[in-house]
Image (spheres, rainbow, N blue to C red):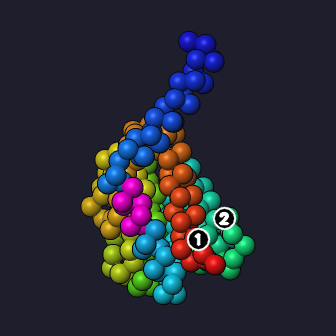
Amino acid sequence: MSNHTKIENILAASIESKQSILANKELISKINKSVELITTSFKNGGRLWLCGNGGSAADAQHIAAEFSGRFFKDRKALPAEALHVNSSYVTSVGNDYGFDVVYSRMIEGVAKEGDVLIAISTSGNSKNILNAAKAAKVKEVTCIALTGTTGGNLAQCADVLLNMPTDSTPRIQECHILIGHIICEVVEENLFNA
């Protein structure tokens, strides 16, 4: 297979995964539900927390920056933060307690009732992400999960499951950032429509 053909196949697979989202009315309704939950949280003085590992950590940080910085509109900053950005915290808790609790301990320490957690895991089975979702439930923090097709174990912990219609990790991650951008754009519009 030539490089051209390989590139075309990758592009086609990426487009197909997004077309599958567009055709899935239930998933679109869940994306809208996520928008409503985050909008309400911000209106009530809540915060948005995000977590993931590897590329999903980068996605968490990217989405947080869109909220706390700006997306399309010049507007006030929104309180959103990726839980891994404090490297001293992550390395000390990882060393002293284990990596499985780096996010759940942060949720226990800083999240409050009415906040929202976006938990990102392509498999839905990352132990530290599952523990964060469980800690969120205890704190009465709404958990929105971004996963792959099945949702993995995270499907049982999330209040809203946004499971992408593909099993390919790169395609899942491409869909996750698309959904993150959609949520940010619509929340921003809801809050700053003037």
Q: Look at 27% across and 61% down and name the residue there.
A: 156
Assess disc 2: are there few (<14), some (14-19) or many (≥20) residues with their C-alpha within 10 Å of its C-alpha: some
Label 2 sits on residue: 71
Work out which quarter of the rendered image holds the N terminus and state it: top right
Q: Look at 45% across and 80% down and name the residue there.
A: 40
Residue 7 percent across, percent down from the top left = 60, 24
Q: Look at 51% across and 63% down and name the residue there.
A: 183
Residue type, label 2: Phe
Mark 1 and mark 2 residues within 8 Å of each other at the beta carbon = yes
Assess disc 1: are there few (<14), some (14-19) or many (≥20) residues with their C-alpha within 10 Å of its C-alpha: many
Residue 27 percent across, percent down from the top left = 36, 54
Tell which of 72 and 80 is nearer to you.
Answer: 72
Q: Secondary structure at mark 1?
A: helix
Could you tell me if residue 183 is visible in this image? yes
Residue 76 percent across, percent down from the top left = 68, 80
Quadrant in which residue 129 is drawn: bottom left
- Residue furthest toward the bottom? 44
Residue type, label 1: Glu
Tell which of 52 and 14 is nearer to you.
Answer: 14
Label 1 sits on residue: 188
Q: Secondary structure at mark 2?
A: loop
The residues colored magenta run: 28-34
Q: Is residue 108 above or below residue 163?
A: below
Q: Determine if the magenta segment contains residue 157.
A: no
Tell which of 129 and 24 is nearer to you.
Answer: 24
Which mark is first along the chain, 2 or 1? 2
